[in-house]
Amino acid sequence: MKVKQLSLFLENKPGSLSRPVRLLAKAKLNILTLSIADTQQFGILRFVLRNWEKAKMVLEKDGFVVKVSDMVAIEVADEPGGLAEILETVEQARVNLEYMYGFTLRKEGKGVLAFRFDDPDRAIAALQKKGINPVSSMELFKRLED
Amino acid sequence: MSKHAKSSTGRFHPLSAPDFLPLPQLRDLQLQRLQAIVQRAYDRVALFHKRMEERGLTPQDVRTLDDITKLPFAEKIDLRDTYPFGLFASPMKEIVRLHASTGTTGKPIVVAYTQEDIQVWTNVMLRSFAACGLHEGDVIQNAYGYGLFTGGLGAHYGAEALGATVIPISGGNTPRQLMVMKDFGVTAICCTPSYFLHLIDQAPEVGVNLKELPLRAGIFGAEPWTESMRRRIEAESGIKAYDIYGLSEIIGPGVAMECQCQAGPHIFEDYFYPEIINLKTSKPCADGEEGELVLTTLGKKAMPMIRYRTRDITALAAETCECGRTLRRIKRIGRRADDMFIIRGVNVYPSQIETALLKVEGTLPHYQIVLTREKDLDVMEVQVEVTAEVFTDTVGALEQLQNKLSRSIESTVGVRANIRLVQPRTIQRSEGKAKRVIDQRKM
């Protein structure tokens, strides 16, 4: 039910982002979605790809510090209130949402968002109870590559 | 602990006998050798001859050991000014080896050895290993760099003369170092303390548990380190960490070495005569008082060094060590006169910054201090590489780390520092002695 995300520490200066991206390109690894958190001095690049183990190896070999975390991918209705319903569910389960970002996917009026919860398992359980099923990695990769 | 059982029995090596010379004999020997070396340098080294003449001195003015204070100092700049061979006291046909510093700025410095000098060096390195309880049958992994740097070959010759098995692996290639350490049954390693910390960090990745290996001693030198580093090394690897001291200008490693009491390196005084001088006045310090270490080579033919200012800051401990050696000890060298910088009127040593970083992170990250001046105000920035241990994927946690590091530095040195987290492997590395301070202030 969880999707692996890789995070990289980057300095906030020209060229910082292109180095890891070029490394991944050379290894023929395709980034499915990404997001950048930034401060004045540094940033954190977060991204999801299919072969994350290989990506981690490639990046670490080049000296990057890579962190792996579990994301939850959830289908969200592309209409007013779509996101609110999901947030309410996890709030009630007292799970904290640390950050989120989207996938470039839209199917039958629904989009897919990636959520980083402080307790992914609890979030999943709460969502499932409400009949909201997170999208598995397999399903996600299949849809993205169709 | 079982891995230290072997070493605690102790074993006396006959060549270590001078370590235990009664003081009157030791002082006598030092005076004889001092007079001979001053004569040799006076006769054969133009710069020394000139400086003696300027002071109206001849070698006959050295009648007691205390007369050494009349003699002129030598400094690193003298080696640069006379590059490459200007301070040699032996003709080239008697010189069997040259070493050189890596030289961070400009020309390197060159040092020379006759066959006899190599024997002296081998002798003090052998005594260094013996002092920390190593002997025949030990397997010594020599991870000091081989080449122009004196560390590798110096340790190598001493370990072989001791009768130990030497693995001349040199520096670098960490996975291979760990594999060899495990597969060859290594009992002692020579490297820089920071490199050993790196080995500790990497060992689990290749499935090596240092505590389970026969490794029991580390001979660590070539860079300043701290007591907290020693404690961490010993706790995490189960070995004893010994401090070795030396510098190429004097001979290389083996100028001083800790015994099993680990109470500061004993100077091999029969070959190296120590003085401590006040940094400002250049006058001798009393025993126990901190100042700059000044060394005179008592038995070096190719390149005698008389009153060489090491720039290393330490103090001499005159009280006898429990091991029975009569050789005086120096306090661990944690800082160098060169490294000290003044910021907003406060004297700061990189070792203090290290202590502050270590307190927060548990391990010493690669770091660099950059000094700049903004609107007439000194600014200290400490660049710290982000390691896998401290990297978390939220901005808040990283900012918290920055704050903690900054507060720790402020409480240690009393000056605020801006912390800049930088990507791993972006701070320049160098063999042994890293450049810690970059001063960009225009004075």
Image: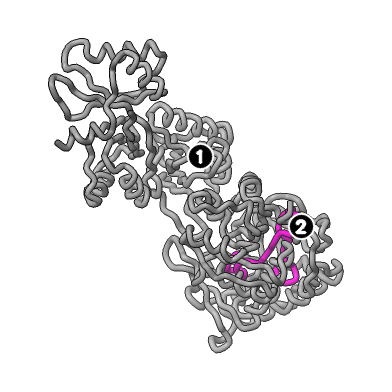
The answer to which image quadrant residue B442 occupies is top left
Q: For this rendering, which residue is in front, B2 or A63? A: B2
For the C terminus of chain A, the quadrant is top left
Q: Residue at x 71, y 59 (%)?
A: B258
Boundaries of the magenta span: B245-273
Secondary structure under tag 1 reads strand
> Residue B435 location in percent, x, y?
47, 53
For the N terminus of chain A, the quadrant is top left
Q: Kindly identify which residue carries mark 1.
A: B343
**What's the amino acid at mark 2?**
Ala
First in residue order: circle 2 vs circle 1: 2
Q: Is residue B348 visible?
A: no
Q: Residue A132 lies in magenta, yes or no?
A: no
Label for residue B5?
2
Secondary structure under tag 2 reads helix
Q: For this rendering, which residue is in front, A5 or B399? A: A5
